Image (spheres, rainbow, N blue to C red):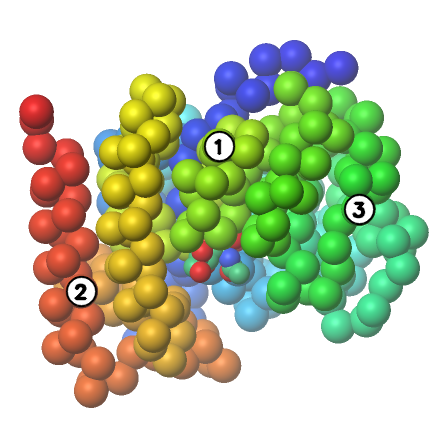
Amino acid sequence: MHTDIVSKYKGIYIAMYSAYDEAGNVDKERVKQLARYYTGKGVKGLYVGGSSGEGILQNEEERKQVLEAVMEEVRGELTIIVHVGANSTRESVELAKHAESHGADIISAVPSIYYRLPEAAVETHWQHMIDSTNLPFIIYNIPQTTGFTLSTKLLAKLAAQDKVIGVKMSGESTFELQQYKETGGEEFLVFNGPDEQFLAGRIMGADGGIGGTYGVMPELFVKLDYLFQENKIEEARMLQIKINGIIKKLLSYPSLYGACKHILSLRGIETGNPRLPMLPASAEHHDSLAQLNREIEETVALYTAKA
Ligand SMILES: CC(=O)N[C@H](C=O)[C@@H](O)[C@H](O)[C@H](O)CO
Ligand SMILES: CC(=O)C(=O)O
């Protein structure tokens, strides 16, 4: 039986980008600068090495370097969830043990990708990671990229273990999200994945969110969560609509990550280009990205101004 898990870990987690130097190598100083930038903004923590963090585009050593930089910079200040999913179970277990030895708070993983695996194989894959450390584990369900949909049957089986404390639900169905919450129970964490549906996910039972676009506007998601908690649903809906206008523009670029990383660079936070095949923002988009950055900054100023 899980106790106090939800109150301990609920909240807003930024799916953090990785930071590279001009040659495309992991740059630990830049990772630290980015992690530092996210402190003091009201978020609960960071989700490191996930989709936005390009963990699956990095080798094992690089993934370790990114996590080490994060831990060296913000350990104790932010709750750190590490994505340790790799295609082989062996590598995932190695990353899980590394995460534990460096003080990460929680591990998480997608299924193995490329092979179309039966549920029993995905279960075994996750179970090995779970058994390899004493850390809590959060299932990462993102069927639109992995091709694997977490069934409530498997969720129930995994959630029966003390170490399995939650699921990051990146599928778009808020009905399934609600079913996951019902299956896992009140003391099982459900994180909303699609940033565009944060409020909808919260209304249907999510305890918080983990998202990639939070990285360029964490203040807005912290505010949105606050409005939901205060039961100011109409105000929250207006903010979600404002956020969605921004996300729609972000998604219109060659890659979401390239756009977000360029916006961060306009604020003095250099993280390099995303790693190919993720396309960088190209020069022709710099003007519109500068305009979008101003729009985000104005919205943040508006929503964080004292009433
Ligand atoms: C498919 C995907 O990567 N989803 C992310 C996490 O769940 C989201 O944070 C999106 O990046 C975001 O909602 C923009 O569509
Ligand atoms: C978006 C998200 O949650 C991730 O990048 O893993």
297 vs 107, left or right, is left
Residue kind at label 2, given as amino acid type = Leu
Residue kind at label 1, given as amino acid type = Ile
- Place of residue 170 in the rendered image (x, y in percent of width and height, measured from the top left): 57, 51
Locate the N terminus by quadrant. Answer: top right
Disc 1 target residue: 203
Q: Residues within 10 Å of mark 1 (few under 14, many from 20)?
A: some
- Place of residue 285 in the rendered image (x, y in percent of width and height, measured from the top left): 21, 81
The secondary structure type at the circle numbered 1 is: helix
Question: Which sits earlier in the primary sequence, circle 3 or circle 1?
Answer: 3
Mark 2 vs ligand 1: CB below 8 Å: no
Locate the C terminus by quadrant. Answer: top left
**Closer to us: mark 3 or mark 1?**
1
Disc 2 target residue: 292
- Place of residue 193 in the rendered image (x, y in percent of width and height, measured from the top left): 52, 48
From this view, report whether residue 13 is shown above or below residue 212: above
Disc 3 target residue: 151
Instruction: Identify the residue shown where x is 34% and y is 74%.
Output: 252
Front-lying residue, 110 or 230:
230
The secondary structure type at the circle numbered 3 is: loop
